[in-house]
Image (cartoon, helix red, strand yellow):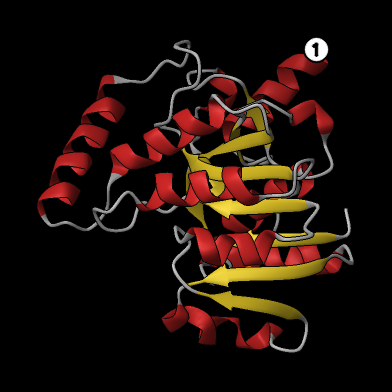
Amino acid sequence: MRKVCIIGASGKLGRYMVRHALDRGYEVVGVCRERSVPKLAEFAERITVHPGPTNDPAVIKQAVAGCDGVLTVLVPWGVKQYSSGTAQAVLDHAEPDARLVFSCGWHVARDGQDQYSRRFRAMVQVATVLARLVRAVEIDDQVEACRRIFASDRRWTVVRGSDLEEGESQGLPVWSRHVGDPILASNLTRRVDFALFMVEALTDDSLVHEAPAIVGRLSPSATAASTRSQR
């Protein structure tokens, strides 16, 4: 891994990924909307930035050229299939052997074995309807984006995140293949550690074609699971 493209680099998660990637000595290319470029000012002399919509195939094609890995934040902005357009552009234009790592929420199911509480399902349904009414985000489009990724034969990983909080790193999050696993019950991860998991996944071949659902390493549910395994 020498050169990495971070799509959605100007967001909170994206900026953490930029830091982790630079710490590893990677050459970093960032993509973000033109109005968000100033958010990357702290990295101005250390990364290359391609301004533009992340669902624009021309922008993505130029940004991912020559990159060994692509980290993509699937943001469901607006009502113009932003997430699925971004995912499709990456799938179409990343280098043939590039490692592709995408982020999304727990609401994206992989194989029908995820178990969601009634409360969680109700919250997602309400949020989906309200967001569509105000034309703010398309939660369903993030699901569509992941459907396309899951169907691809590219070297992908989809990291499904819990609720996020700020704070110092607790280390690499723990994960499970299925939402509903008791280890995930705390439903909380430090944002800096979500970014850490994304960057680590670039070089972890065991995560190819996996959709890990993650939770903070020091969260109560992860700590309890670790204690049980040591007995």
Residue 15: x and y, percent?
A: 62, 69
Instruction: Name the residue: 44% across, 38% down.
Output: 145
Residue 62: x and y, percent?
A: 64, 66
Quarter of the image where one finds residue 2: bottom right
Residue 195: x and y, percent?
A: 65, 54
As drawn, 38 above or below 190? below
Q: Amino acid at mark 1?
A: Arg
Residue 170: x and y, percent?
A: 71, 51
Closest to the observer, 36 or 221? 36
Query: Is residue 229 rendered to the left or right of residue 157?
Result: right
Instruction: Name the residue: 52% across, 50% down.
Output: 89
Closest to the observer, 130 or 142? 142
* Residue at the disc numbered 1: 231
As drawn, 102 above or below 78? above
Instruction: Name the residue: 68% across, 43% down.
Output: 100
Instruction: Name the residue: 78% across, 46% down.
Output: 200
